[in-house]
Image: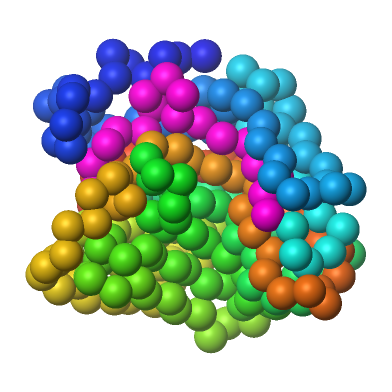
Amino acid sequence: RSGGGGGASGGGGGSAADAGRIVWRQARDGFDGIRTVSCGGCGIDAGQRDAGNVVWAHVPGAGVMRVVAYTGDQGQIPPVTRGRFKGRFRVPASAFPGGNSGFACVASQTASFVINLFLQTNHLGVYSGPGVVADAQSTDVATPSLSADTWYTVEVAWQQGVSRDLWLDGVKVAHVTGSTITVDAGATVVPAEFRLGINSYNGTSGGPWSVELRDFTYSDDPDAALP
């Protein structure tokens, strides 16, 4: 696998060579490892660890914390407060989650969510943490209803204090206009890791669900044209 193309420079700006390019591809770069937290009975398969283009994750019910494949140990995710990622996901015919459950996440240097894509039953949602787009956190749930056993393309772009946008199959389904950041959120808004799998499953009564994720790409440029 690649080691991050030379990495980013120190501080929050990244190196000039990194600006605007695709810094990570699921099919090319794979993952650094697997994480499970408070997740008895969970399962995950990330294919070949060095070039797996499929992540399949399963949880037995609500209340679990995390079962994900992640990248970021080698500096692949630039520490800049903007970015864009795109990929495909499918919920097998089994079931959608009974509550909010994340499946694609940008985590910060303090392990908090910068951006978290989630399902609210069969609706796609996006969350950005405090200080990412505005001082307060922001959550949107898109109107279209999703169907099981169907592939969808999802894309999200954000820039601190400017905007956050969400697309489903090429159609913009959510937009937030940013505002001046007045509170220094520090490392809580600086990306450090990209995760695919099941990042959380809120509540106590939801049943089992699974998700399959393919072809994800990540850029530090919110205007990048991703394949």
The residue positioned farthest toward the bottom in the image shown: 143
| Apparent side of residue 76 relative to residue 223 in the rendered image (left or right) | right
- Residue 77 at x, y percent in the picture: 37, 33
Residue 28 magenta-highlighted = no
- Residue 121 at x, y percent in the picture: 70, 77
| Apparent side of residue 144 relative to residue 177 in the rendered image (left or right) | right
The quadrant holding residue 31 is top right
User: Looking at the image, is 104 positioned above or below residue 63?
Assistant: above
The quadrant holding residue 120 is bottom right
| Apparent side of residue 92 relative to residue 75 in the rendered image (left or right) | right
Q: Residue at x 73, y 28 (%)?
A: 47
Q: Residue at x 46, y 24 (%)?
A: 73
User: Looking at the image, is 143 positioned above or below residue 224?
Assistant: below
- In this rendering, the count of numbered labels is 0
Magenta-highlighted residues: 65-83
On the question of residue 34 being in view, the answer is yes
**Quadrant (top left, top right, bottom left, bottom right) of the C terminus:** top left
Q: Residue at x 57, y 24 (%)?
A: 32
User: Looking at the image, is 76 positioned above or below residue 160?
Assistant: above
- Residue 162 at x, y percent in the picture: 17, 65
On the question of residue 226 being in view, the answer is no
